[in-house]
Image: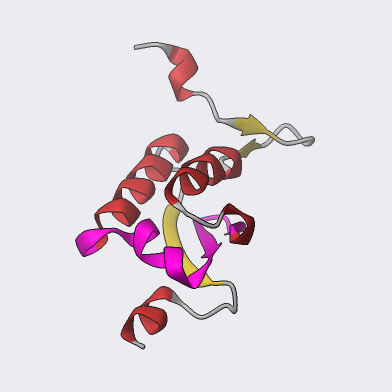
């Protein structure tokens, strides 16, 4: 297997791995309104939460039918981080409303 594929997508100024660049590239390819995309990462020693903020109209594109797209994004992040910590993805609209609440309304 090519070792280059296992390296982190980006390295920040402190030399730490960051996956936000790849995640942002994937999300931007899925949405119709890329200007509304913002991704926030909150990490602890055992878990990382990626909050993906998109236009309300693009939420379904990030989640996909039966959550297939969101699960694929999650799987990609887990593979990149290689089990170092648990990963959670939260999709919210530009007002901070979580996807499940947007889809229910």
Q: Residue furthest front?
A: 32
Q: Residue furthest top?
A: 2
Is residue 6 found left or right of 9 in the rendered image? left
Find residue 104 and report its image quarter: bottom left
| Residue 48 coordinates in the image, percent (x, y) | 52, 56
| Residue 9 coordinates in the image, percent (x, y) | 56, 30
In the rendered view of the protein, which quadrant contains the N terminus?
top left
Find residue 5 and report its image quarter: top left
Q: Residue at x 39, y 44 (%)?
A: 78
Task: Answer whether residue 6 is visible to the viewer in this image.
Answer: yes
The stretch drawn in magenta includes residue 70: no
Is residue 47 found left or right of 95 in the rendered image? left
Task: Answer whether residue 43 is visible to the viewer in this image.
Answer: no
What span is in magenta?
A: 37-66
Q: Nearer the viewer, residue 79 or 84?
A: 79
In the rendered view of the protein, which quadrant contains the C terminus?
bottom left
Q: Nearer the viewer, residue 87 or 57?
A: 57
Q: Residue at x 61, y 61 (%)?
A: 36
Q: Is residue 93 above or below residue 19?
A: below
| Residue 35 coordinates in the image, percent (x, y) | 63, 56
């Amino acid at each position: 297997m090519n070792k280059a594929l296992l390296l982190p997508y980006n390295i920040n100024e402190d030399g730490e791995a960051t996956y936000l660049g790849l995640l942002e590239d994937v999300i931007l390819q899925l949405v119709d309104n890329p200007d509304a995309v913002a991704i926030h990462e909150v990490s602890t020693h055992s878990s990382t939460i990626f909050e993906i903020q998109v236009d309300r109209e693009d939420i379904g594109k990030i989640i996909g039918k039966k959550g297939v797209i969101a699960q694929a994004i999650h799987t990609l992040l887990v593979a990149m981080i290689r089990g170092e910590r648990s990963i959670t993805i939260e999709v919210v609209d530009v007002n901070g409303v979580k996807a499940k609440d947007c889809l229910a309304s």
